[in-house]
Image (cartoon, rainbow, N blue to C red):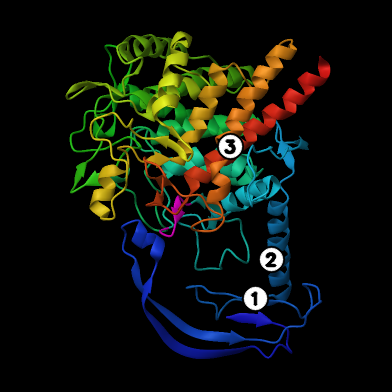
Amino acid sequence: MAVGHAESEITFIPTGVWYWHFLRRHDQAAGQPAIDDLYLPGVIRAKLWPGEDASSSSTLTIIATAEELSTQMLSTGQLHLSYKRCVERQRSLSQPRRYFGEGGEAAQPLPVLPFPTNSPLEDEEFLRLLFQAGDRFVIRRDAPGSAINRAPTFYEGKPTPLLVSGYFKGGENTRDALIALPGLLLVTGQHDEATRILRGLARHFRQGLLPDRLPMSGEVLEERDYGSVDTTLWYFYALDAYLQVTRDYELLDDLYPRLADSISWYREGTYHSIAVDPEDGLLRTQQEGKALTWMNAMSKGVPVTPRSGKAVEVNALWYLALSLMHEWSHILYSREQINFIPTYYKEQSGRCKQSFNMRFWHDAGGHLYDVVDGPNGDDTSLRPNLLLALSLRYPVLNEEHYRPVLDAVTQQLVTPYGLRTLAPNEMGYCGHLKENAEEQQEGLHQGSVWPWLIGPYVEALLRVEDITPFLNGKQTSETLRHQESVWRKGIQLLDAFRTQLEEGVLGMVGGVFDGDAPHNAGYAVASALSVGEILRVYNLLARISIRHLVSAISI
């Protein structure tokens, strides 16, 4: 349907043209099905007048939908208002100049970071494109079970947003959405969308777990849809990031019973033999034939990287969740929302941390085990998962191990486009993704580079080098020089992505790159994980630059 000015002479010309064997070359390069047949139902022709404003004869609204529109009352005023809001939104994304401080207020301008090398993409343009890229993954739709046939969300009501994981498949992945949420929604000031996503997800807890994906309208989730040990723990991470920005403790009060119930299920045991080991307080999985962590690629129905046992990042997230519940219990108690402060969270987090440092430190390798108590014993493979042990707000790793872990990762896993999923000297390392889709799955987490991992790495770097966003204490000139050096190193880690935004799918960053140079892009041409974490790191470094300037002035 097309709606425009009465004198626009809008005409729909049917064509019925098929474009046979259309080639999607990026899918071809990624080893995925790349041939498709495209249909052109027709062409819309209309007369427009240049130089007019949006309320007169210069606009044409085209509605493409599977909904029945014959019974809808189309209001020209509503269409013009929707158009105006869309234009204003795009303009606001083109000018991301405000830093949203703690409490959600616009505190001061968000600086444009100075990059060390020349690029056709200017520093300011890079920031603008990042904001626009992030917005592409935010989709609005009706909530499951709502009367979506009554009226398109276009006209009324408040749609429930979701974060799609990538294009062109456009599927949503709960874990990806939770990891990307701080960058995609909080950095860009879309706090209301973040609130509704967190509330919406909370409706789908089952036996303490969140599903791998959200249901379509009318669909009922089944046990097999709850196939992850860490997705729910990422919910605690995302909620914490949200609360750090908004201080929306009313939402925390609403969610707290579900969070407490989730911790109880993890403690006692839930789907897929996910449970805390009563012997040491660490979280484990023992489900044969399942890949329950983020490294969940399957080949011929078998997990490529099963990681059964006690995975390092799972227990880092488990410690974070326990520590946050202890913190949040104090907050709600002080607000008289709960009557007592549970002692369990502090006790269990202390036990988890003690056991973690006893069990996971691999002294001979100078880093952490990737998995302990697995079917074949302890896994000494050097993978980026260990970064979460020191990058999260509550790090589970003892401080004396920070430096060797960071050094090992820096020497063997860091590339210009993110971190390798396996060190090149490890058995099974795959430096290039194959063209065959099945073989591609075998290499996804066996050395391929994932850009989203740059987020945990930069946070670990800043923690090890004692650069925090808050720069507490009196600063000397020598301290500031050191801080600036580390800060510029963080900026340099984002530099390669300026080029990426001008290659492949324009204005996007891919999800996976080859482990070996020149690190060709493959598999996922646009990734919410990548864009979200790059935005989050950019914001983190920008916040440091603001406080760095304040400290320098005070000396």
Q: Give 116 or 374, whichever is nearer the viewer.
A: 116
Residue that appears at 63% across and 51% down: 129
Return the x and y of residue 293 as percentages of the image width and height.
33, 35
Residue 258 got which mark? none
Q: Is residue 201 above or below residue 241?
A: below
Q: Which residues are magenta?
A: 164-169
Q: Which residue is mark 1?
A: 61
Query: Dot 2, crowdedness within 10 Å: few (<14), some or many (≥20)?
Result: some
Which sits earlier in the primary sequence, circle 2 or circle 3?
Answer: 2
Q: Secondary structure at mark 2?
A: helix
Residue that appears at 47% across and 90% down: 15
Return the x and y of residue 327 as percentages of the image width and height.
55, 18
Which sits earlier in the primary sequence, circle 1 or circle 3?
Answer: 1
Residue 223 seen by the camera: no
Q: Which residue is mark 2?
A: 82
Q: Secondary structure at mark 3?
A: helix
Residue that appears at 41% across and 49% down: 520
Q: Is residue 300 left or right of residue 231?
A: left
Mark 2–mark 3 Cα distance, whole angstroms, equals 30 Å
Q: Are marks 2 and 1 in contact (CB under 8 Å)?
A: yes
Return the x and y of residue 303 as percentages of the image width and height.
22, 40
Prevalent SS, magenta region: loop
Residue 536 got which mark? 3
Image depth: mark 2 or mark 3 in front: 3
Q: Is residue 194 above or below residue 478?
A: below
Residue 426 seen by the camera: yes
Q: Is residue 166 magenta?
A: yes
